[in-house]
Amino acid sequence: MLLAAAAFAGCAAAPQAQAQRLTESMTRAILSDNPGSVAHGLSGVGKISRAEVGLLSDKLNALGKYQGLKLLAYNATKNEFAYRANFTKGETRIVVRLDRQDRLSAYRVF
């Protein structure tokens, strides 16, 4: 029974680690106003304009220097993760969703 619980915990940690890594990468691409990296990092999303990335980049950069993410919630049914992104002048909430291949399929800033 204990072995099964440990195996299940390991499976749950894998998508969470992947989500954290992908969210960090996407956040840094947005902060650096890099639409190519943003488009490449999102699976199944159409064309992303430089203006869209620029607006979001400006919004995040206005919060100061990026200091990292903290996981707030995980919805296993939707494979969705909510993070608090910390900056020197404030914070914002970022929600991401992974597809069935554990690729980033949604990235939202609130």
Image: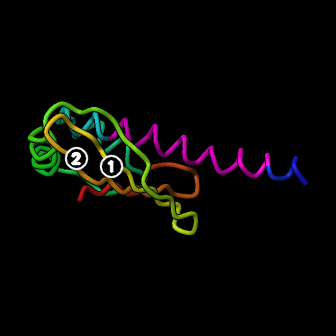
Q: In the displayed structure, does residue 63 sit left or right of residue 79?
A: left
67 relative position to 73: left or right: left
Q: Residue furthest toward the bottom? A: 77
- Cα separation, mark 2 vs mark 1, equals 7 Å
Where is residue 62, by image quadrant?
top left
Whether the magenta-drawn stretch holds residue 97 is answered as no
* Magenta portion: prevailing SS class: helix
> For residue 66, which quarter of the picture?
top left
| Residue 107 position within the rendered picture, expressed as x and y whole percent measured from the top left | 33, 54
Q: Determine the secondary structure under disc 1.
A: strand
- Mark sitting earlier along the chain (2/1): 1
* Residues in magenta, as a range: 6-26
Could you say which quadrant of the image residue 10 lies in? top right
Percent across and percent down for residue 2 are 87, 49
Q: Residue at x 70, y 48 (%)?
A: 11
Q: Residue at x 21, y 35 (%)?
A: 34
* Residue receiving disc 2: 91
Residue lying at the far right of the rendered structure: 1
Q: Which label was assigned to residue 110?
A: none
Label 1 packing within 10 angstroms: few (<14), some (14-19), many (20+): some
Reply yes or no: does residue 15 show up in magenta.
yes
Q: Locate the N terminus and report the quarter of the image it occupies.
A: bottom right
The residue at the point 52 percent across, 64 percent down is: 75
Q: Nearer the viewer, residue 29 or 88?
A: 88
Q: Are marks 2 and 1 in contact (CB under 8 Å)?
A: yes
Residue at image mark 1: 84
For the point 33% across and 40% down, the residue is: 26
Q: Where in the figure is residue 5, as x and y percent of width and height?
A: 80, 52
**Amino acid tagged 1:** Arg
Q: Is residue 7 above or below residue 81?
A: above
Does dot 2 land on a helix, a strand or a loop?
A: strand
